[in-house]
Image: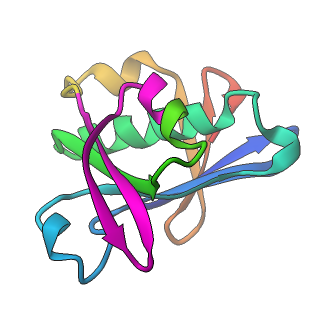
Amino acid sequence: MPGTLVAVAQGAPVGAVCLVEHDMPGHEAVAGMSPWINGLYVAQPARRHGHGALLVSRCETWAAALGHHALYLYTERGSAAEQPYKRLGWRIIRYERYDGMDVTVMRKNLSPVPPAGPAKITLACKRRQKGVLICRIDGRQAC
């Protein structure tokens, strides 16, 4: 899997998310699901400015561009994270007990990216470190 997207605002990192091939290691019920969003984090002062939604959206586009038809994630059941994911079109597919906590497993069906699709969005990325991309979307540093 590719790696990590980092959101940058005013020249400073404010959030990150990983795109990984598998998550919930050792949990047989989700073993065949791939890829996953993992570790979404937005710094407290930068929350409620759309950085998290943009990171998730770019991860979705990235996974679709790699030919995937769905993307998965899990979060603690009943946590504040469930509702924002639902608003972004994610749906709950199962409840599990994993790593000592009750979790909600969610799925987002991805739209295929046409071959010319990414060219319609001005996206310039620089690889700063192995697996980490710093991107500027439509002239705005976003992820």
Task: Depth check: give the residue in front, 95 or 25.
Answer: 95
Is any atom of residue 76 visible in this view? yes
The location of residue 85, given as percent across then percent down, is 47, 35
Residue 79, image x, y percentages: 56, 48
Which residue is painted at 26% across and 21% down in the image? 116
- Residue lying at 25% horizontally and 38% vertically, measured from the top left: 64
Q: Residue furthest bottom?
A: 26
On screen, residue 59 above or below 25: above
Residue 117 lies, in percent from the top left, at: 30, 21
Name the image quarter holding residue 48: top right
Give the answer, above or below, for where 85 lies relative to 130. Answer: above
Q: Can residue 65 be seen in this view?
A: no
Q: How many marks?
A: 0
Q: Residues in magenta?
A: 85-110
Question: Which residue appears at 37% of the width and 38% of the height?
Answer: 60
Magenta span main SS: strand
